[in-house]
Image (cartoon, rainbow, N blue to C red):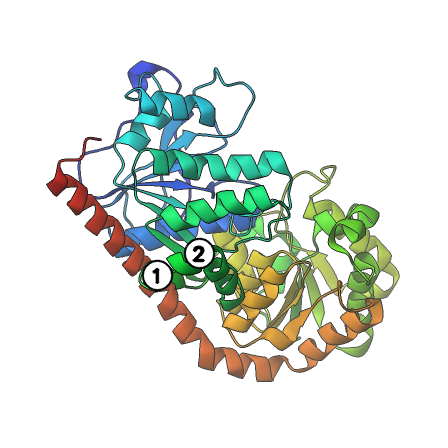
Amino acid sequence: MPKLKCESRRTGEKTFTAWPDGALRVCLFGAALDTANLGVSALGKSVVHALRRAAPDSNVAVFDFGRGTDTCQLDSSGNTKPIIRCGAYHTRRIYRPESLWNIRVSAHLGGLWNRGARLLRAADAVLDITGGDSFTDLYGPWRFRAVTLCKQIALELGKPLVLLPQTYGPFASSRNRRIAQDIVRRSAMAWARDERSFDVLKELLGDAFDPARHRSGVDVAFSLPAVRPAEDALGAAAEWLGDKSAPLAGLNVSGLLMNRPGTAARQYGFQAHYGEAVISLVRRLLKDSGARILLIPHVVTPPGHYESDIGAYQRVADAVANAAGGRVTVLPALHDPCEVKWAISQLDWFCGTRMHSTIAALSSGVPAAAIAYSPKTLGVFETCGQGAHVADPRQLDTGEVVERLWQSWAAREKARESLQATLPAVLRRAEEQMDAIVAECVKRSTEDAEAGAPP
């Protein structure tokens, strides 16, 4: 089972976690393994899982927001080779060894005392996924600097940088656009996770586009394994999952949009009222279908946090309490995206706002709909031939969003048949893209070794 078992973080130089002897040495940025945002964790675990499938002897270091270094094991195939975790993040405390600026300077000075710098200098390749959709300046200058700095460090060290399947742009600033353009042009490979984003990538590259290096792929989370949780972790939902006596619909509600509706509406330009649309959908399912409804959180920060899905679910449950009749319950917060994927795989239909919750459904062959607040979701659904099941509150009013989702529920069996036809090809692409990425990393490593390039 792909459980994460880690030692406590170590910070002393005497206990520095160095690369073990062996094959390919790869650093991963942009997807920590154990965040409260299960979409990000799904990306990290999917990359490690795919790497270990394509190159079982590979050594992997995941750079995250922790302090110091440790090792952990994470693989569903039984591969017990340890993964290194190393803190690396953008901070004003540049004296900290986890500071990206500290890592950058130390790397240029031979690595010095800095563990992250030494891991990077000895790496064969650097992979970066930018949280799947964060290679943009829409989240502000600090975030943009954070996601570009790690890429620039790799390029400055002369390491092959592979941009894993992700979304590119948009860029509000022409300066930031030029920075992103420079990074994608200098990368060894750059992958987009859907055709819409691939068009943006090609536009960034201009005459530097090379079809051998710049590719259209699929979201790496399509290869995330599903793992059944312990029975006691499922709470009241345990009786429903796998029980086919009544249809079971799953619903993921985004705390980011539900908890601060005014802010979310202004930030994303909604015509529809997100919270009202979600509650109206639940009420219609209760009134016009015999379905039971399972609310599934995918960002499991505490309820007081503005992004918490858990707090959002309580508001939905309270709003429909009089009509629920015992047909609405909440899946307890699970911290492993593999376990949440298993729960979603047991559903008859799923509607999500967190995009990687919907990928858990699509990749399991479960008919799915999405309430989308950015173009990324439509691109992913189109990859599976399911674009008609996306409701965009930026373009639809509240009633239209609910109607689009209801039509998705009504057409779930047709969607299931469509997924059965398209999904095998998508899963093959997920495997083939990692095979191509590993092959490129091995090739670059071999070329550097033959050229006598210093670490």
Image location of residue 37, percent across then percent down: 58, 45
Query: Image height check: is 381 above or below 449?
Result: below
Q: Secondary structure at mark 2?
A: helix
Dot 1 or dot 2: first in sequence order is 2
- In the image, 318: left or right of 330? right
Residue under label 1 = 210
Residue shown at the point (75%, 65%) measured from the top left: 327
Image location of residue 284, percent across then percent down: 81, 72
Image location of residue 274, percent across then percent down: 79, 58
Residue shown at the point (49%, 39%) measured from the top left: 148
Near-viewer residue (89 or 148) = 148
Near-viewer residue (286 or 25) = 25
Image location of residue 208, percent across then percent down: 38, 57
What's the amino acid at mark 1?
Answer: Asp
Alpha carbon distance from label 1 to label 2? 9 Å
Q: Which mark is residue 205?
A: 2
Instruction: Identify the image quadrant of residue 21.
Output: top left
